[in-house]
Amino acid sequence: MGRYIVQRLLSSIPVIFLVTLISFSLMQLVPGDPAIMVAGLQATPDEVERVRVQLGLDQPFHMQLLHWYGNLLQGDLGTSFLLGRDVLEVTLERLPVSISIAVYALVMTLLVSIVAGIIAALRQNSWVDQLVMTIALIGVSLPNFWLGLMLIVLFSVHLGWLPTGGYVDFREDFWGWLQAATLPAVSLAMLQMGLLARITRSTMLEVLRQDYIRTARAKGLSERKVVGKHALKNVMIPVVTVIGIIFSLLLSGSVVIETIFSVPGIGSLLGSAILRRDYPVIQGGLLLVAAMLLLLNLVVDVLYAYFDPRVRYRNGK
Amino acid sequence: MSEPLLSVRNLKTVFKTEDGQFAAVDDVSFELNEGEVIGIVGESGSGKSVTALSIMGLVPNPPGRIAGGEIRFEGRNLLELPEREMRRLRGGRMAMIFQEPMTSLNPVFTVGDQLFEGIIEHEGVGKRAARDRAVELLDKVGIAAPAERLDQYPHQMSGGMRQRVMIAMALACNPKLLLADEPTTALDVTIQAQILDLLRELQEEFRMAVIMITHNLGVVAEFAHKVMVMYCGRAVETAPVGELFERPSHPYTQGLLRSIPHLDHEGARLRTIKGTVPSPFALPPGCRFAARCEHARPACAEAEPPMIGVVPDHEAACIRLTGYRHDLTRATEPVA
């Protein structure tokens, strides 16, 4: 297993390289001049030119690229054009905010949709099943920014239960964090809950038809053991597979949601960095997000081996 | 004579589908004494597996449902037992092995785990005692190095070995009744013989009653004491094994026996029963086999023939038999 993990880590290096290369190239194609953004609209052409040289933007594309990779190898992600601060510092400040909300949304997604999906499958075609599947369909169909706004209207404006936005560090005030993070997390999770509930339901239905479930019943096991042990572990195999994808979608969805809820996370940082052509922040932010998702997928694959022994033995013990 | 171990009376199991409802098992009755082996023979769809699942209380519901009849096992009507009691019997007093060893074991648990849980469930012993028992069982069903095998997963074993594990699982709590649903069909021919030998040894050793479901008359001849032939959800002939082979009395049974290939008839064409099984939704009136029967006559379509005695213990559902036994009051149709 140790060797497998090292292999996976090594193979993620080219992925990181490609991600940063693509984002770097794309930013060159986008119109807009960061030098003007930094110097300000009132600046004279001379001043703009000075800023351009200062930021190294007068260099040809490949030189900029090499320069950036050179610094990266030394662990330097550069300095934000606009904030004037170290990119690594800024992103690492923002990342936990987004991760905490995404993890909250993920836990919510897993708990709600696995339970709902299993109940729906066990009561197939009953009103419970139809209710769950209808809610799931609505969840899949609602755009999350609209849902976020509606949640604010209902829970913050009318009922006054939860704040309209902002963020509280969970290390300082867990209860405050929970209040601030709930609406963004629900807005993010709704789509994923809908999808995962449907996946769980159909997988459960499929598993319950398997011969080994009949064998388990023929042994005289209780229905709770048949479903909770024999069926559940098989259901978890496809569910675990999509956890990685779900988490990455939760993180990437945060760009819009963090803006709506004014959450100071990596999503809103990236969003404003793109609008203002803050190249180093965009590059550094994407790099960190990509690295995190790769790591997460590795964790998922290791988990996968736990649930499915057939995978474990194929990869060597 | 004391009450038989198992007595099935007028069992009717129906399935509801989108095209309507049909009876997969229709008015089937038979008895089984302790230590006795009955072979249930028939084509796919004849209702033999559903009969076994009905006895085990494992008919998938929905779409299936036991609509009538009585199943008495050790003096109690299983159809009236609460689910909790049924669960105690299942895997305890009666056990079942299935056709597909490749898919009948849960792929994500070790073989040992799947063996223990039944033992723990029924005998209320601890994990250590269950493990000892499991080793003993695997040894009994002819698995070498049983202790190591316990920690393996099903995908690390061959089909024959998995079926041995299934048998060990079924025997875990010394059942009085074993239901074997085509236990050798999915296996290689050489393995089939081994598994059959094993089953026969274990049957004798444990003095189990066995319901052997098969479409293979050879298996029946070797293994069973008596036979029930099923066609379209109905029993068409029941007889002691020797009697059935000697004097097959229902045209369907005769057809089955004729369609066994013989090595000594070199170059002879394989004989088949012409026609196909009717759809369960469009069963003909009267005898269900009439359309394929070479002895069919108009009277066959008028009423379903009742079981008619040929000799004691041997019955068949064919109106031709009324021609041999005029004293039968149930047969009203004179033979043309």
Image (cartoon, rainbow, N blue to C red):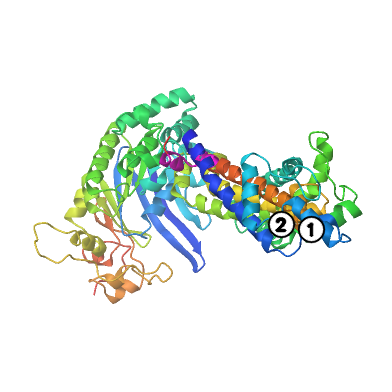
Residue type of the residue flagged with mark 2:
Asp
Q: Identify the element where label 2 is drawn.
A: loop
Q: Which residue is mark 1?
A: A49
Residue in the picture at 44% in, 35% down: B110
- Residues at circles 2 and 1 in contact by the CB criterion of under 8 Å: yes
Query: Amino acid type of disc 1?
Result: Glu
Residue A14 % position (x, y)? 54, 48
Label 1 sits on a secondary structure element that is: helix
Say which residue label 2 marks. Answer: A58
Can residue B107 be seen here? no
Q: Is residue A265 visible?
A: yes
Of label 2 and label 1, which has the lower sequence position? 1
Per the rendered image, the range of residues in magenta is A302-315
Compared with A103, B13 (above or below) is: below
Q: Position of residue B296 (x, y in %)?
A: 26, 72
Compared across the picture, whether A299 is left or right of B15 comes to right
